[in-house]
Amino acid sequence: MRGSAHEVSYAVRLRVVGHFLGQFCTIVALLSVAPLGVALVEGQDAATIRYLGVILTLGGGGWLLSRLRVERRIQVNEAMVLTTVIFLVVPLVMTVPIMGIGLSFVDALFETVSAATTTGLSCLAGLKELPATFHFARSWMQWYGGLGIVILSVAIMVRPGVSAKRLAMTGPPEEDLVGNARVHARRVLLVYLSLTIIGYLAWVLLGGAPWNGLLFIFSAVSTGGFAPTPGSLADFENIRLAWVVILTCLAGAIPLAYYHTATRKGISYFFKDVHVRLVLAVMLFSVVGTAFCFHWFDGMSWSRTGIHAPLMGISAQSTAGFSSLNTGDLGAVSKLFLILSMTVGGGIGSTAGGVKVLRLFILFGIVRHVLQGMSVPPQTVLTTRVGGRKVEEREVQDALMVILVFAGVVFLSWMPFLAYGYPPLDALFEVVSATGTVGLSTGITGPDLPTPLKMVLCADMLLGRLEMVAWLVLFYPRTWFGRRRSEI
């Protein structure tokens, strides 16, 4: 079996990856026109010149690479490698204009990695004094990092098949395997745009400032969490605006493909689907659990709990990372519960991070399956089910691998923080927040954080955004060595 698997495997074709990377670079060049426009309006000459340089470099390089003649079909491992390269190229390239406001390379890289991975952690102080171009660039990167990059890339370059499913990372299996990948990508992009517009209109109609609303909604729909003010939701005078942000985060944490399906099959389909119901149920559990911890363990009054528990619970569970209070002031039990929420995350095919709700319930199903096996005859055939649906072996393997690797990354990243002498619980909170692409912080992440630890968190954010799998493919030897298909 081992030999036969090797015989049918194909290594990555660099020419193919280069061709599609060229198309992707062209997309990023076009996306960079938006912050360039803001820099021009604001009169930020240094940022304007740097963005022009980025646009010309990416546009020119992308045009040359995209002219490589290749077969239009892309392999699964090539799609995975391309995805990892995408999330490496964007932060590195975007450090150039971000450094124009006076940041060091390390700090600029931390901000761009946090933006592209939709995490929201920041190591900067004095956010209010930073120019509008910087705030827009971060939120804009979170918006297209949430799903825009992937969907735009899929819509342009991927043909139907499993590769499209892997690269698009979107919803229900029946939707992913039917029809043209470009059509599917455009449908999900339309949902993403619709959620963004609805969230922004709600913000403006409720009296929010248009500019801040744009920044908050870009970050909210991508479950990113960047805010233009240091206090995040705590700086809101109008609680209704905080709820607009949080409900937009909740909408982004639900698998996006289900919205489009609901428009064809009716809204009842949306709430009947087991995946959606699991996400909503876990969100409710997070809110109730957070309220219990805030009141009973932190001594918070019920009036304050009623304000902060829903905002913090949904923010943590959706991996958005907006905060309505100082997380560092919370007690140990509240921090542990939020760590649990951040670890689980939202739905598969959403913009949320974490190991995902469905994988957690698959794990519960496996445990139940094992326990049932102890009390039935040996010849009985048992199947793992979630919400009445049979879970395929491939799904079980995927769930176990992601959960196991997530835990391993968190543990290995936690060790350096302990070596530097940081409090164990606060350090664990920070590492889980980065790996789950959440952005909540106990105060460890800041200007004084040592450079090696900033790099650890950057690695966590990149690993967590792609759910580890793409990185394992990138470093797997047979990805690069072995037989290759014809490239043309």
Image (spheres, grey):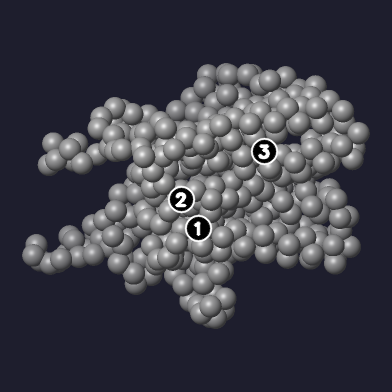
For residue 47, say whether it is visible: yes
Which circle's residue, 2 or 1, is located before the other in the chain? 2
* Residue 376 percent location from the top left of the image: 14, 66
Residue assigned mark 3: 29
Along the line of sight, which residue is nearer the eye, 264 or 55?
A: 55
Which circle's residue, 3 or 2, is located before the other in the chain? 3
Along the line of sight, which residue is nearer the eye, 407 or 270?
A: 270
Q: Amino acid at mark 1?
A: Arg
Label pair 2/1, CB-CB below 8 angstroms: yes
Figure check: 167 above or below 472 = below
Q: Residue at x 88, y 55 (%)?
A: 209
Q: Quadrant of residue 60?
A: top right
Residue 131 appears left or right of 469: right
Residue assigned mark 2: 158
Residue 412 appears left or right of 302: left
Q: Secondary structure at mark 3?
A: helix
Figure check: 285 above or below 335 = below
Number of marks drawn: 3
Q: Amino acid at mark 3?
A: Ala
In the picture, which quadrant includes the N terminus?
Answer: top left
Q: Amino acid at mark 2?
A: Val
Residue assigned mark 1: 182
